[in-house]
Image (spheres, helix red, strand yellow):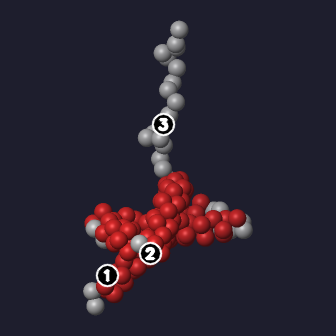
Amino acid sequence: MANLERPLSPHLGIYKWPLAMAISILHRITGVALTIGAVLMVAIFIAVASDPEYYEWIRGYLTNKIGKTFLILWTFALFLHLFNGIRHLFWDAGYGFEKSTTTKSGVWVIIVTFILTIAVWGAAYYCTNV
């Protein structure tokens, strides 16, 4: 018979999420997103090499609102994964393990990711509307 008095195991809603934990989870998610984006890039390269109609079909999907949203999020994933990977390289070398340093570097990863994502898409918008 089950003991109803024993405590239940805590779940993620109980824990306070430190920034390092959130970025670690985002790093894994962005790795998956980059893999999906890489498959899409291969499909685009195959379309360019094989059939103009197939390329226009893919281009039609990527230029609508959903496609552009996907590409913006993919760019965000690329930058976040890149800069968090650089942060991990410093950790592998033995630098930046202090709690204040990990928090500061995590904040910088997020700030630089947002700035560069906005800059890339701002430049793309500017170049297409000149």
Q: Is residue 28 above or below residue 107?
A: above
Q: Earlier in the sequence, mark 3 or mark 1?
A: 3
CA separation, marks 2 and 3?
48 Å
Residue 93, picture quadrant = bottom right
Which mark is nearer the camera, 2 or 3? 2
Residue 65, picture quadrant = bottom left
Which mark is nearer the camera, 3 or 1? 1
* Residue 105 in the image, given as x and y percentages of width and height: 55, 68
Q: Residue furthest top?
A: 1
Query: Circle 3 is placed at which residue position?
Result: 11
Under circle 1, the secondary element is helix
Q: Residue at x 66, y 69 (%)?
A: 90
* Residue 58 in the image, given as x and y percentages of width and height: 36, 67
Q: Residue at x 48, y 50 (%)?
A: 17
Q: Total number of numbered labels?
A: 3
Which mark is nearer the camera, 2 or 1? 2
CA separation, marks 3 and 1?
43 Å
Q: Earlier in the sequence, mark 2 or mark 3?
A: 3
Image marks 3 and 1: residues in contact by CB distance under 8 Å: no
Q: Is residue 70 left or right of residue 88?
A: left
Query: Circle 2 is placed at which residue position?
Result: 48
Within-10-Å neighbours for mark 1: few <14, some 14–19, many 20+ = few
Image marks 2 and 1: residues in contact by CB distance under 8 Å: no
Instruction: Say if residue 60 shows up in the picture.
Output: yes
Q: Earlier in the sequence, mark 2 or mark 1?
A: 2
Q: Is residue 66 left or right of residue 81?
A: left
Query: Circle 1 is placed at which residue position?
Result: 125
Q: Is residue 53 above or below residue 120?
A: above
Q: Is residue 21 above or below residue 62?
A: above
Within-10-Å neighbours for mark 3: few <14, some 14–19, many 20+ = few
